[in-house]
Image: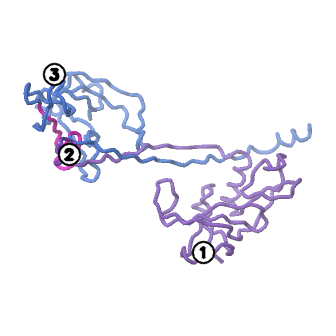
Amino acid sequence: MAEETKKKAEKPKPEYIQVKFDMPRRYHWSTGKYLGKVYAEAKEHKKLVSNVCPQCKQIMWRPTVVCPYCKIEAGWEWAELAETGTVIQYTYLVFPLWDPHYGERFANPYPSAIIQLDNGVFQRHWLKETNKDKLKEGMRVRICWKEDYNERGLGLQDVPYYEPIEE
Amino acid sequence: MPQVAEKLKDMDVWVYHGQIYIPNTYSAGDVGSRFLIELRNNARIMGMRCPVCNRVYVPARSVCKDCFGQLKEWVEVSDKGTLLTYAIDNVAKPIQPTGTPIIYGIVQLDGADNGFVHMLGGVDAEQIRVGMRVQAVFKPREERTASILDIKHFKPL
């Protein structure tokens, strides 16, 4: 027994193989009437749209069937969201994030901001500006779309970030 | 119900196609690592012999399924064998290593006592018969990565 352990100690360290394989699972779901309109407009015309309450004339975002203030059916009246907006608050994220759907790593750092669009809608989204010193509350931003038609079709994921503009 | 049908009348059907990415990694262990390294370095298929029941397992395993003894005797088996059974799969799935149609076969290699699961290639699906002789086709040395797919497929002799 002692000889065996001595022999083992003299052997070089064996190579161990790591077996790696990916198992992507696909899923499909129907978005329904209202969300389907948003996804279709984003893919076809690069526009964010949402429906308007017929009574209080507020823009719903995201589109809803029933207005949460008037408690009536919001209907099929659509308005386009503004392309530009103002940063209300931002967070400078340095935590490494992975895309759970395609296994790619998100850009890092990636500032996340609450943006008030010019027609009053609040929206949380990413910002293109990664320099911490150039970020400030009240900066003006504009929407950026994925340029490739075939890559669009995932709703809000068609908008990678908002880019800063100078006015 | 008529109300529902009316609402669905001019509905744009939009289906969201997504996926969840599930990466997997496991260590092949002592015996599995040596089996895969032999495939990569020397293009040899190695098995393990049980000294009690005299059975040769391919791919190599560390414990006999009947005798439960620790196996230590490595043997090299031939890259030729006999097809025991097969299945043809025409449905493309993202897990599969190659395109469709993919033909899975269980091959009893010469010198082994159990079946070895792999793919068949270089043959029409209609020409495959149970009991035909097949031979392993290895990838070139540069493309081998110590994986079971270092064997490209089994081709008929």
The segment highlighted magenta reads: A34-52
At mark 2, the secondary structure is: helix
From the image, which quarter does the C terminus of chain A lie in?
top left
Q: Which chain is blue?
A: A
Q: Which mark is residue A69?
A: 3
Which percent across, then down, holds residue B26? 62, 43
Q: Name the residue at 59% across, 59% down.
A: B149
Amino acid on which the number 2 mark rests in the picture:
Ala
Which percent across, then down, holds residue A136? 22, 23
The residue identified by callout 1 is B128
Mark 2 and 1 residues: CB-CB less than 8 Å, in contact? no
Q: CA distance from mark 2 to mark 1?
A: 52 Å
Kindly identify which chain the residue marked by label 3 belongs to.
A
Kindly identify which chain the residue marked by label 1 belongs to.
B
Q: Tell me if residue A16 comes above or below residue A98 in the rendering.
A: below
Amino acid on which the number 3 mark rests in the picture:
Tyr
